[in-house]
Structure formats: C-alpha cells, structure tokens
Amino acid sequence: MNVACAFDHAGVPLRETVITALQSAGHEPQDLGVADDYPDVALSVCRAVIQGEAERGVVVCGSGAGVSVACCKIPGIRATVAHDHYTAEQCVGHDNCNVLCIGARVVGTAIAAELVQTFAGAAFTGEERHVRRLGKIDALERDGLHANLEGS
C-alpha cells in the first residue's frame, strides 16, 4: 500500500520510525517532509490521498489532535488520532479512515511502529451497518447542519 507521510516540527522524532515501519511491513511510504505548522503537513498528506497519489496517509504532530482537526476539514478525508492498536485497526475496519494521526509526544517509537503497520494493514469490512453510517458521514460532509440523517 502506498502511504503518504508528513510531520510537523513536533512529529520529527517519529519520522524515521514511521517510514521504516511501513517499509518493513511491505508498504510504500511517501515521505512528504516536515513543516513547522501542522496544517501544512495535514494538507500535503490529504492532497496526496484525495488526488490518488496515496491510498492512505499518516500525519504526525505533538499530540495528533491538531493534524486530525486540520485533516477533517478536507472533504473526502476521514482522519482520526489512534494511540492504541484497537483504534488503529478499527478506524479502518469500521470507519474506513484514510488518514492516521499520531502524537509524537504521546507514544514512543515501538507503539508508533505498531500503529502505522496496523493502520496500513487494516481493511474496511464493508458490512452494511458501517456502509450505512459512512453514508451519514457523507451527508454531514455534504450538507453540514442541514443534513437529514434519520433516513440515511
């Protein structure tokens, strides 16, 4: 799997770990580099995913929160912070997330390596209930507060 990766100034300590972990699991990481401001790295990864240059993305900042907020502003991106194995797998399996956000000040190298490998190796289940819920997410993205979710 082709995975776009980028890091803000606080995410740099996990840069080599993320790239190496993806490579060792048989994935193709695209290192999109480093920027001081987390919205910049979020945008670079999201652009790669939306334009089809990468199937998924990994963005690392200090907490994971800032890049998650920034990524979720981009239509078509489903990003989340995951600092545990269950969430890193479930966010793809149930929610079809396409961007993983990690906090370099929250997890160490061993956990970060496990997270990116789990995320990149996970697959969306396609179960009806998950597809239905993603349809509601699409309606929220499209219609915002005007969305009618009950019939979705």
Image (spheres, rainbow, N blue to C red):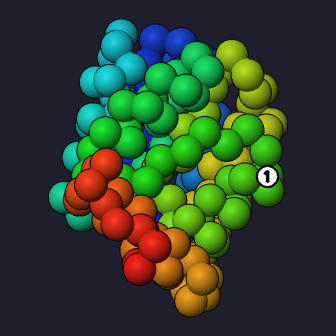
Residue 116 x %, y %: 63, 49
> Does 120 appear above or below 83?
below
- The residue at the far bottom in this view is 128
Kindly tell me whether residue 138 is visible in this rendering: no
Q: Secondary structure at mark 1?
A: helix
Q: Residue at x 38, y 20 (%)?
A: 38
Q: Residue at x 68, y 54 (%)?
A: 88
- The residue at the far left in this view is 51
Q: Quick one: quadrant of the C terminus? A: bottom left
Q: Residue at x 37, y 39 (%)?
A: 71
Residue 4 x %, y %: 39, 48
> Does 118 appear above or below 74?
below
> Does 120 appear above or below 40?
below
- Asked whether 51 or 91 is in front, the reply is 91
Disc 1 marks a residue whose amino acid type is: His
Kindly tell me whether residue 147 is visible in this rendering: yes
Residue 34 x %, y %: 37, 21
Q: Is residue 29 left or right of residue 124?
A: left
Residue 139 x %, y %: 32, 65
Q: Residue at x 34, y 66 (%)?
A: 148
Residue at mark 1: 85
